[in-house]
Amino acid sequence: MMRSVLAGLALVSLAACGGATADNAAATTDSTTVATDSAAPATPATVDIVETALAAGSFSTLAQALTAAGLVETLKGPGPFTVFAPTDDAFAKIPPADLQALLADKEALTKVLTYHVVAGNVPSTQVVGMTSATSVEGSAITIAVVDGKVVLNGNSNVIKTDVAASNGVIHVIDAVIMPPKQ
């Protein structure tokens, strides 16, 4: 049922979500190098980011949010995209009333979700050398390596890296990251 709902959504152009391209996915690097838990497959993935996340079984809230924001078709598009994907447990850290309010506000939800996406395919080997990345939403995501782990915005840990999809890569995170208030 969820797959049919997701597949039936209208196309939302990436340009409407910030228009980011691989050329403006800015990154600032430092000299930090850290080994990561990368499990990239030997052969390219054959399913897109949305199908890959659905198959994992731990992203139902993310799927619900993408559906509510009308972003499913965008993330099924050619990309490439790098998605910092919050798990269901990450969304559960948001107070229930706040999460329901976010899911009901398409504009705010789109802003939060596109803040989790970086244009281009950015594997963990590149992420660990970055101090920030520009999200599709337009704001910077700060990146730090702390005790051998990648941390976004000082509060979200990357818990799994390099989940390959046909149109990009997913890095799984343990907390939803929020764009800065404008």
Image: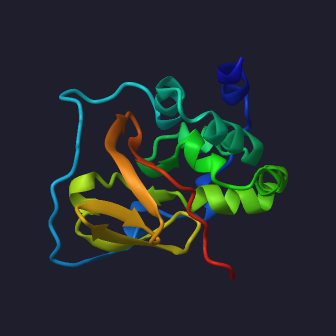
Q: Is residue 11 visible?
A: no
Q: Is residue 162 visible?
A: yes
> On the picture, is 158 further left or further right than 65?
left
> On the picture, is 125 further left or further right than 112?
left
Q: Residue furthest top?
A: 1
Image quarter where the C terminus lies is bottom right
Q: Residue furthest bottom?
A: 182
* Image: 22 above or below 96: below
Residue placed most toward the observer, 176 or 79: 176
> On the picture, is 32 further left or further right than 83?
left
* Image: 40 above or below 33: above
Residue 91 screen position, x and y as percent: 63, 48
> On the picture, is 166 further left or further right than 63?
left
* Image: 66 above or below 101: above
> What residue is rendered at 56% in x and 49% in y?
90
Answer with the quarter of the image where residue 32 lies: bottom left
Answer with the quarter of the image where residue 68 lies: top right
Answer with the quarter of the image where residue 59 lies: top right
Residue 1 screen position, x and y as percent: 72, 17
> What residue is rendered at 44% in x and 72% in y?
154
Residue placed most toward the observer, 175 or 85: 175
> What residue is rendered at 80% in x and 54% in y?
106
Residue placed most toward the observer, 64 or 81: 64
Residue 64 screen position, x and y as percent: 70, 37
Q: How is the image coloured?
A: rainbow
Q: How many marks?
A: 0
Residue 15 screen position, x and y as percent: 61, 60
